[in-house]
Amino acid sequence: MTTHSPAADPARHQQWLDLMQELNSDADPRTVRLLERLFMVSHAIRMLGEQSLEEAGLSHARFRLLMNLFKSEELDGRPDLNPSEISTLQGTSRNTVSTLIRDLEDEGLIERTLDPNDRRRFNIRLTEDGRNIIREHSAAHFRTIAACFDTLTLDEQQELSDLLTKIGRKVMIDVV
């Protein structure tokens, strides 16, 4: 599969920007470039994160599910969550969460328990192995991600965070 990075072929990249301008004459080419860069950087960071989790045999989605359970247990004092809560935290469908739960349960990283208040439902909690995998692999994972930003000064990191927050607020307002 051939990919065309803007840096690898500036002429082709300019053709792409010209095409975008032709399709929408009101489009600001700077916006197209910003969006393109944001996607490229986001994808690269995501791929580095995935690579850092491979040693633990985890995908990003599985790691997030385990971290959500860990956070609930450690910070909220809730050792278990129901699948609907996990789905909301993950930002994914119940079907996707069901598959993740099944896989992590098969590996002994989580367990299901019947909800004491509603015997038709079940809750999900970390096993000791699940807690251990989070403790063993999260530090290396977060160091990998943090290294992506060490090219920025602390002030630049704060500015980037502020700008992304500002864009996020606008997007969330427009989505709702």
Image (spheres, rainbow, N blue to C red):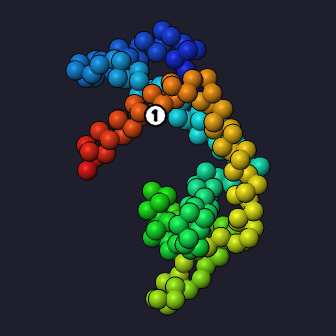
In the picture of the structure, the residue carrying the numbered disc 1 is: 161
Counting other residues with Cα less than 10 Å from the Cα at mark 1, is it few (<14), some (14-19), or many (20 or more)? few
Q: Position of residue 55 (x, y in %)?
A: 77, 49
Residue beneath the point at 65% across and 76% down? 111
Q: Nearer the viewer, residue 99 or 48?
A: 48
Residue beneath the point at 36% across and 40% down? 168
Q: Is residue 53 above or below residue 163?
A: below
167 displayed left or right of 123: left
Q: Position of residue 162 (x, y in %)?
A: 41, 33
Q: Nearer the viewer, residue 76 or 108?
A: 76
Q: Amino acid at mark 1?
A: Ser
Q: Is residue 107 visible in the rendered structure shown here?
A: no
Residue beneath the point at 40% across and 31% down? 163
Q: Position of residue 158 (x, y in %)?
A: 48, 31
Q: Position of residue 173 (x, y in %)?
A: 26, 45
Q: Nearer the viewer, residue 34 or 23?
A: 34
Q: Quadrant of the N terminus?
A: top right
**Residue 36 occupies quadrant:** top left
Residue beneath the point at 55% across and 35% down? 43
Instruction: Determine whether the residue tagged by mark 1 lies in a helix, strand or loop.
Output: helix
Circle count: 1
Q: Which residue reaches farthest left?
A: 26
Q: Is residue 151 visible in the rendered structure shown here?
A: yes
Q: Is residue 102 above or below residue 24?
A: below
**Residue 2 occupies quadrant:** top right
131 displayed left or right of 151: right
